[in-house]
Amino acid sequence: MKKRHLLAPGPTPVLPEALLAMARPIIYHRGPEYEALMARVREGLKILFQTKNEVLLFTSSGTGGMEGAVVNTLSPGDRALVIRGGKFGERWGEICEAYGVQAQCIDVEWGRAVEPERVAAALKADPTIKAVFATHSESSTGVLHDVEAIARIVRATPAILVVDAITSLGVVDLPMDAWRVDVVVGGSQKSLMIPPGLALCGVSDKAWAMVERSRLPKFYFNFTAERKSLEKNQNTFTPAVSLVAALHESLAAIRAEGLPAVFARHDRLARATRAGVMALGLELFAERPTPALTAVTVPQGIEASAIVKTLRTAHGITISGGQTKVKGKIFRLAHLGYADESDVIVCLSALERTLNDLSYPIKLGDGVRAVQEVLARAG
């Protein structure tokens, strides 16, 4: 028997209380029991997003929430600014193109963070831009973009800031109202510790004004209709009832731990993982790394696929390789959601043995020792 460890950036391991919630008999989504459940979920989402406004909930992947953010705020021919520095930044541009939005792109080298000054320059050069689309935690590269600085720039203009926070929500501080981020998109399968299937969209007052003027086609991902339904503790269409029950448990766990403690835990696990990786002589890929995962440059003489496969088959650990432009060049170790110190220790121990199995010159124990030292200092 081999115990399995899921250390990929998503889906991530599921909270036990959420598993139990999904195993309970399903309830009727138009009945009072569901309405009571949704009322609690709505309040929990406001705490998570750090907003006074309603957080919309759709049964879909996070990409559905991204599409909803585009079609509910813009109109045909509108101009938008897209920050592209990874696979998911590129997705913003692809959605805009699909709906006839004229997207001007700021291209950032994969592994690097966008310079906020480039956003300011682009908005100054084209004051007709209606929306700026950014990715907070770019999971394809392991980069954390400076959304706080970008928000300071955008809020001084008529444009709105729309952020893909699917891998950062509940991992790193993103106070939506305080930073005046206009649309924040989240997904259920990352730090929320439940399976894929729910998209979450926080919407500011500034963004709601644009929703009222939007003329792009929309049916399922209709922000106005969903807000009206949520005000009655309902959803417009049939929701994933069991996932909503799981989300309730996840939000309760996050609230019990407290957001500052949640952010500190992710930061601690990230620092420990990176210390372990560097102690083995490996290089980090991201210049401004996200606390959600660690992207590691594949050392010369080893295939990325061999590292991923050996970790899975010999040690029972599932991680992720690189995607598109960085496929074969990096591998990614996740430490978000239902993760703790033991997960990091197990991961680094297995990585040491994998590299040793692949004849890469390391000293067994160096990575784990570095992890333990960081964790010991953190208390």
Image (cartoon, rainbow, N blue to C red):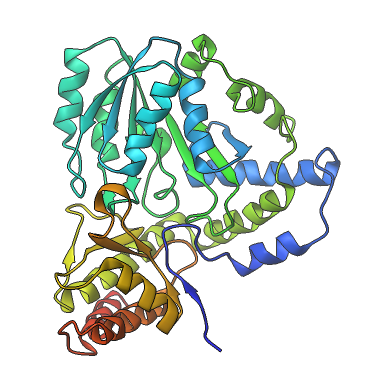
Residue sitting nearer the eye, 254 or 163: 163
Give the position of the N terminus as an image quadrant.
bottom right
What residue do we see at 33% from left, 37% from top?
89
Residue sitting nearer the eye, 13 or 232: 13
Is residue 353 at least partly visible in the picture? yes
Q: Position of residue 138 (x, y in %)?
A: 32, 47
Q: Position of residue 54 (x, y in %)?
A: 57, 32
In which quarter of the view is residue 334 placed?
bottom left
- Horizontal placement of 245 versus 321: left or right? right
Give the position of the C terminus as an image quadrant.
bottom left
Q: Position of residue 211 (x, y in %)?
A: 51, 17
Residue 49 versus residue 180 in the image, above or below: below
- Horizontal placement of 379 versus 234: left or right? left
What residue do we see at 42% from left, 15% from top?
100
What residue do we see at 51% from left, 78% from top?
4
- Horizontal placement of 185 versus 352: left or right? right
Q: Position of residue 221 (x, y in %)?
A: 59, 27
What residue do we see at 17% from left, 73% from top?
278
Residue 88 versus residue 125 in the image, above or below: below
In which quarter of the view is residue 341 placed?
bottom left
Residue sitting nearer the eye, 184 or 6: 6
Residue 192 versus residue 208 in the image, above or below: below
- Horizontal placement of 201 versus 252: left or right? left
Is residue 344 at least partly visible in the picture? no
